[in-house]
Image (cartoon, rainbow, N blue to C red):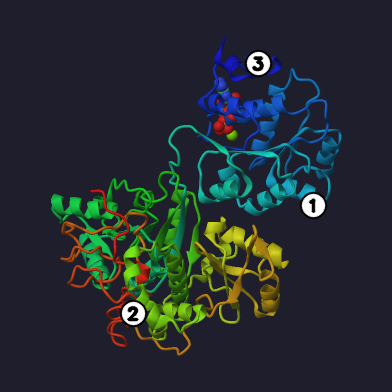
Amino acid sequence: MNKFEQLGLSESLLKAILDLGFENPSEVQEKAIPLLLEKDTDMVALAQTGTGKTAAFGFPVIQKIDANNRNTQALILSPTRELCLQITNELKNYSKYEKGINVVAVYGGASITEQARDIKRGAQIIVATPGRMQDMINRGLVNITGINYCILDEADEMLNMGFYEDIVNILSTTPDDKNTWLFSATMPAEVARIGKQFMTDPVEVTVGAKNSGSSTVSHEFYLVNARDRYEALKRLADANPDIFSVVFCRTKRDTQAVAEKLVEDGYSAAALHGDLSQAQRDGVMKSFRGRQIQMLVATDVAARGIDVDNITHVVNYQLPDEIETYNHRSGRTGRAGRLGTSIVIVTKSELRKISSIERIIKQKFEEKTIPSGIEICEIQLLHLANKIKDTEVDHEIDNYLPAITNVLEDLTKDELIKKIVSVEFNRFIAYYKKNRDISSQSGDRRERDSAPREGGNTGGGGATRYFVNIGSRDNFDWMSLKDYLKETLDLGRDDVFKVDVKEGFSFFNTDPEHTDKVMEVLNNVQLEGRRINVEISKNDGGGRRDHNGRSSGGGFGGGRSGGGRREGSFAPRREGSGGGFKSDRNAAPREGGFRSDRNSAPREGGFGGRNSAPRGEGSSDRAPRRSESFGDSPRPRRPRRD
Ligand code: ADP
Ligand code: MG
């Protein structure tokens, strides 16, 4: 008995396999076939080219469809005409001893009426390229509303070729209860997105090294003037309060300088480079792993082999000399199946490097705009609100409560909330007023992608910017949110733009003519039982100078917030944390961001705290320090395990 016989395949298939001369199943076949035969399930299968994926889905689909029923039961989408014909041919071979099975190929460049006629005769399986398939659906020449199986073959290639929208449209005309099998050689972000959007609990089959191209990583670049590089870095950190990142510089000197500046400006950063002693490097890595450092500034050599999971962002403060090195850098994030972002801060003269990198990584970059001060402000405020909500109360506080209540008792809940939040907001808004816009634009790249740029200047000035209380927590990314908004609001393709998705909320723009509609419709919609709330954001989404037009040269730093300290990750630091970054004497945990005071006690003065005004306001280019408000309670939440 050969191994094919152990997979649960029917006699007629086994006979065909014998004819094909296949002796043993390949790894992906051995793993996928029994699972697919056994139950009705969604599947994501990752295996390199040439590993026999066609049979891995082909055998099961042939066995599972009903040959006595002439309706279309399975749709296989494939990127090119050649592959389409190849798959069709293979399926015909596989099913040659099975009576009554018809496989029809549907692809562009051939007569659509002939293909339609073949389908009409009864094709249980259609193998199609997305473009032609969409065409046939539009013309009513095919009916896939009753299919049981949809297979996306070479999904990465299809998306590479720009078939995202077609695929989404095609899938939306298929029944919800079908099974979707996705076969791909790599798992770039778009493939993961399709998987997330259209599959339920897919079983995963992986053959060989997963993600050799580091494809759970999405790539973004921000175009700035050379002198704004550092400012851009700060804002990106401020716009991502939970950032946990490796920041790459080209030289040891730059690495040291950037780390020092960050520390000075109140961020929890440290340098890692070859001039540190081994002990210092160990110390830095230990702090990084322990999340006491949110931004590890490193040289390529020193960062080699950093195996820390959960890194949210890789920041290319400067691009490497050898663009191949980019791959090693971006591979520090998106590990262990998590999604990560690789950011490049780039100047105009380096822009062509982006295209070279795109060719190497076989992925596209998204051009984004450095967030404006007001946008950071909004992000930080919402972050604060969420943090307040999630803060566990230590009942030590109960002792003080009567006195506190006494002070605050005349305030209504609304007033109290406003005041609490204003503690942060007043400071931000004061700072923001001095803030200038630092983003540069690369108009020439804009038309290159099929999707309108989200970060570009599209519709800058006149547009209305909205804030909406749904975000990545609700499984949206910018593309799916945009689709959702377009659909819900019944707007056209380019009417919703500059969609920027954060965890618990998002921003987007429309032209002012749609504002009434957006407010009225969206505020009366529910998403999975939750009311959607949309508000007009004061931020125009970037691309403009600030209101008073001043260029203070200063940056909006946003409040530093205590990201990085995910669950249990921060705790009193016992040891001086090695070389590379200025460490404070005190034992209190450093709340990423602000420079600790001398004293080790949790600072009194909850909100408002010590000095809640930005330091050196008006003259300094420093970010405002985070006050010791509860955004970042200096108290450790959990004891540290050392
Ligand atoms: P992929 O889709 O993974 O790129 P294919 O399905 O096109 O790979 O298969 C590649 C080649 O391997 C084809 O020529 C196919 O006939 C052959 N092949 C597939 N499965 C087997 C097997 N179990 N034993 C021998 N050859 C196989
Ligand atoms: Mg294939």
Residue holding disc 2? 608
Residue at the outermost top position: 1
Q: Residues within 10 Å of mark 1 (few under 14, many from 20)?
A: few
Residue at 31%, 85% (x, y): give it.
617
Q: Which quadrant would residue 78 be assigned to in this image?
A: top right
Residue holding disc 1? 138
User: Given this view, does label 2 or label 3 mark the residue nearer the observer?
Assistant: 2
Q: Is mark 3 within 8 Å of ligand 1?
A: no
Q: Residues within 10 Å of mark 3 (few under 14, many from 20)?
A: some
Residue 118 pos. (x, y %): 83, 35
Q: Earlier in the sequence, mark 2 or mark 1?
A: 1
Does 274 sit left or right of 556 as displayed?
Answer: left
Q: Is residue 449 visible?
A: no
Task: Tell me the kind of residue under disc 1.
Answer: Asn
Residue holding disc 3? 14
Count of number-bearing discs? 3
Residue 323 pos. (x, y %): 36, 54
Residue 54 pos. (x, y %): 61, 30
Q: CA distance from mark 2 to mark 1?
A: 60 Å
User: Given this view, does label 2 or label 1 mark the residue nearer the observer?
Assistant: 2
Q: Is residue 79 above or below residue 492?
A: above
SS at badge 1: helix
SS at badge 2: loop
Task: Tell me the kind of residue under disc 3.
Answer: Leu
Does 460 sit left or right of 395 as displayed?
Answer: right
Task: Tell me the kind of residue under disc 2.
Answer: Gly
